[in-house]
Image (cartoon, rainbow, N blue to C red):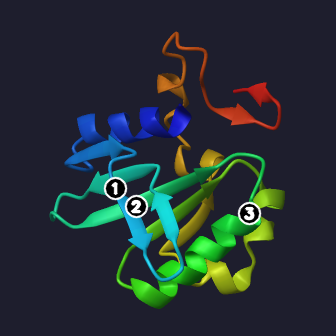
Amino acid sequence: YPFAQYLQFMKEAGQIKDWWYEQTTFEDKRSKMKWVMDFDVRNNDDTFEYYECKGYAVLTNVRWKLDIMHETKPEVQITMVFQDKKQMGRLGKKRASYCKRVCLLKDITRGTAKIADTGYGCGIWSGNKPI
């Protein structure tokens, strides 16, 4: 997974303390919303950020989950990472404003392409081609 590789690179470079995959679940009993965050990141100052990576489909439920999170837990810092601009645009300005950051995978991992090929069949992609 390219973003996991990026986070490991950041950890080894001392830019973050640690990261975990699918460790935190946010729930809202009233709406019956349950959202497992893709990645938890502990920053060097011991604050946490949550990253949600989206490939080629931003479904209605992602927008709905952001609405619920904004309403019930506005202090939670979520960064949305998208594969392409078209999908990023589907999030919409309203939901994007609920996020700490909204970005493209290629922009956030820029300069770390050398770590992309780990032999697990994953890497950093641009369009439909590995870079």
- The percent coordinates of residue 87 (x first, y second) are 78, 58
Q: Are marks 2 and 3 in contact (CB under 8 Å)?
A: no
Query: Quick check: 83 above or below 122?
Result: below
Are discs 1 and 2 less than 8 Å apart at CB? Answer: yes
N-terminal of the pair, mark 3 or mark 1, is 1
Q: Which residue is mark 3?
A: 88
- Residue 24 numbered tag: 1
The alpha-carbon separation of the residues under discs 1 and 2 comes to 9 Å
Q: Residue 83, labelled with which disc?
A: none
Looking at the rendered structure, the kind of residue marked 3 is: Met
Residue 89 seen anywhere in this rendered image of the structure: yes
Q: Say which residue appears at 79% left-offset and 68% top-offset.
A: 89
Count of numbered circles on the image: 3
The local secondary structure at tag 2 comes to: strand
Mark 2 = which residue?
A: 50
Q: Which mark lies nearer to you, 3 or 1?
A: 1
Q: What type is the residue that disc 2 sits on?
A: Tyr
Q: Is residue 27 above or below residue 24?
A: below
Residue 130, placed above or below residue 8: above
> Which of pointers 2 and 3 lies earlier in the amino acid sequence?
2
